[in-house]
Image: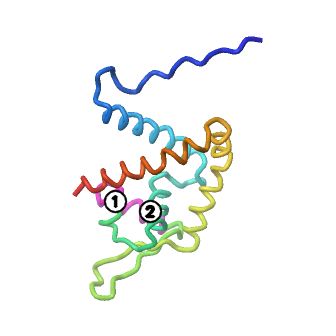
Amino acid sequence: MTDKMEPEPKPASLAGDPIEFAVMTEIGIISQLADTLFQSHLPKGMTVAQFSVLNHLLRLEEEQTISQLASAMQVAQPTMSSTVRKLEDKGLVELILEPDDRRIRRVAVTDAGAKCRNDAVAALAPIAETLRQNMPSSLWHDILPQLNRIRVFLDQMRG
């Protein structure tokens, strides 16, 4: 039996492209691949967009308006309204009226929503294990702070 050498992966950008473009292209492709893989492990009927809203609110530990969520997820307000309505129908979020202005409603994650988010992350355990077996943990620990810096910077550029 012979060991086959895996070919060097082809870059996602063209020779001569700026490095920043090449990195962003890689991140975009990774995002698409990760979303597709993640979607296949989410609870039946839950989308990556719905999970992202739950994760966002739990990560920030705050309630947000639909407008704030739409801005954070960079989608149109009607799109976010639809996503929130579906989460509300499932009992995963609730809308809280602002006491000073009853026209404003804030989206809050319910206990069921937090459990659903955590269950979705737990369902990824087999994928995480495969990643651990095929890529050193040092890679993940080294790259996370750098990706965080890129995310924060790009978020600040949005204005």
Viewport quadrant of the C terminus: bottom left
Q: Residue at x 34, y 76 (%)?
A: 105
Q: Amino acid at mark 2?
A: His
Q: Amino acid at mark 1?
A: Ala
Dividing the picture into quadrants, the one containing residue 127 is: top right
Q: Residue at x 41, y 74 (%)?
A: 63
The disc at residue 56 is 2
State the extent of the magenta-drawn residues as a range: 70-88
What is the secondary structure assignment of the residue under circle 1? helix
Residue at the outermost bottom position: 100
92 vs 101: above or below: above
Residue 80 in the image, given as x and y percentages of width and height: 36, 60
The reply to whether callout 1 and callout 2 are in contact (CB within 8 Å) is yes
136 vs 57: above or below: above
Dividing the picture into quadrants, the one containing residue 104 is: bottom left
User: 102 left or right of 140?
Assistant: left
Residue 154 in the image, given as x and y percentages of width and height: 30, 50
Residue 142 in the image, given as x and y percentages of width and height: 51, 45
User: 56 left or right of 133?
Assistant: left
**Other residues around mark 1 within 10 Å, as few (<14) / some (14–19) / many (≥20):** some
Viewport quadrant of the N terminus: top right
- Residues under labels 1 and 2: Cα distance? 9 Å
- Is 155 magenta? The answer is no
Q: Residue at x 66, y 14 (%)?
A: 4
Q: Residue at x 42, y 64 (%)?
A: 84
**Other residues around mark 2 within 10 Å, as few (<14) / some (14–19) / many (≥20):** some
Q: Earlier in the sequence, mark 1 or mark 2?
A: 2
Q: Nearer the viewer, residue 92 or 53?
A: 53
Residue at which label 1 appears: 72
Q: Nearer the viewer, residue 119 or 7?
A: 7
What is the secondary structure assignment of the residue under circle 2? helix
User: 118 left or right of 48?
Assistant: right
